[in-house]
Amino acid sequence: MSTPLLNHFQSNQPTIEERIAAGKKIREIFPRIEQANYKPAANRADPVSILEEQAKTRLQELVPIRYARMLTSPFSFLRGGAAIMAADLATSKATGITVQTCGDMHVANFGVFASAERNLIFGINDFDETLPGPWEWDLKRLVASIVVSGRFLAADENLCRESVMTAVRCYRKRMREYAYMGNMELNYTTIDEKHVLKAMPSHQKEIKKVMSRARTRTQMQVLGKLTDIVDDKYRFRDDAPLIVHETHTQAGRPIEEAMGLWLASYFPSLLDDRKALLSHYRIVDVARKVVGVGSVGTRCWIVFLTGNDTRDPLFLQAKEAQASVLEPFVSGSVYKNHGQRVVAGQRLIQGAPDIFLGWGELDGIHYYVRQLRDMKGGVQFEPGKVDIENIPAYCELCGWALALAHAKSGDAAMITGYVGNSDELDEAMFDFAVAYARQTEKDYKALVDAKKSGRIKVASEAR
């Protein structure tokens, strides 16, 4: 007897060439040059009001830290203003080709991390906003971040242009490669250290430095950096307001009871082999931690567990998962809660996710969980911490990783048909990036003015 699912597997699937042709056809309706267009909507919301609306669901005592971090630079503002840009992108035209988007795509949201096999992988490392949506939205946010961060780092227009063009060119090149790749081969594809070194022979020294630094970021390194010995036992080191021991949750539940309930909720989301591994550990300490820029004010707990002894530590981070900033503009999540949404999106597009990646719930708040650090590392976009001459090479890696994420979750052949082989899309994306960089700088000034007028309360230092 035929079933809808069986019919799906028996139906004739369009060929690669047919899907590429379908992508090319979209150019007739939406020429690539039009991707350059950015004009703020006549009824565009005040950017500060969007941030104030988000603040209503945050821990109020931490919101001033969020503003302080966003006021560090226009790039920090862009990082924290994903909801602002989502609203702007939603007013623009799109091809209609959907992928699992990152939702908060910018140059600081890439890095290296350890696979289950302990290999270092380069890829996207932030999925709080992930949701199915237009592939262009990720690419446009990425290129805008390249120009905004480049200007902050004193890169001239030529270097910003080269960086954007390199990122988009690599995105197109890799997407074509993935379009012709078998589905199973694509599923197993990652960007590991060997691939990066091979693709960038002139940047061996810089790449090896980042990889070597990531290898030092182990559970034992966290033990030394974030804990002290108190009464002959390791405990998290308080660093108020960034790391704080709490006696009760916001709902008034004793923290010991709360952690037991949280663990019981999180445990079923793991695969059986991960459950067996985690069962050998016990919780010894818990603290609340401030993380990120845009995430500041959301609830985040760090959990210290030990196995056989103190030389066998495990650190987990449970971060509140709120609705994606894209949700008002695309179809809502199909998952029961936003913790599951984040985890499902990450598993779909990252390729080699954390072995303890999962989700749980406590007092009606949903969290996603991962290791606090597991050979994670990346480039710090701060003056004096990055050589601006290396930015184009780094942006090439970003374009590569974004193409892989979109190919795994969308139709690589159709995207390939649209983006093509010429530099028309590259030029358009640079023009968009420059236009949106100007918008970001105006919005940043609006936040500066809100501070000066007393409209918002800002912490004395971002820390």
Image (spheres, rainbow, N blue to C red):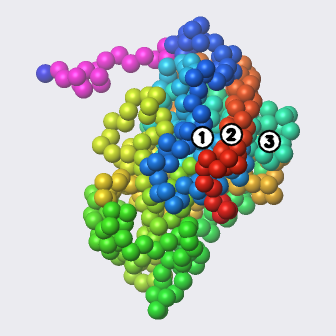
Query: Magenta includes 12?
Result: yes
- Which disc, if any, is residue 151? 3
10 Å crowding of disc 1: few (<14), some (14-19), many (20+): many
Magenta residues span 2-20
Q: Which residue lies furthest to the left in this view?
A: 1
The image shows residue 313 at horizontal and vertical percentages of 46, 76
Q: Quadrant of the C terminus?
A: bottom right
Q: How many numbered marks, from 0 up?
A: 3
Instruction: Report if the CB atoms under discs 1 and 2 are less than 8 Å apart.
Output: yes
**N-terminal label among 3 and 1:** 1
Q: What residue type is labelled 3?
A: Arg
At horizontal 59% and vertical 26% (from top left) the residue drawn is 44
Residue at disc 1, secondary structure: helix
Task: Report the side of 184 relative to 272 (left or right).
Answer: right
At horizontal 60% and vertical 40% (from top left) the residue drawn is 48
**N-terminal label among 1 and 2:** 1
Residue, disc 2? 446
Q: What residue type is labelled 2?
A: Ala
Task: Report the side of 375 relative to 379 (left or right).
Answer: left
10 Å crowding of disc 3: few (<14), some (14-19), many (20+): some
* Observer able to see residue 170: no
At horizontal 68% and vertical 47% (from top left) the residue drawn is 453
The image shows residue 28 at horizontal and vertical percentages of 59, 7
Residue, disc 1? 48
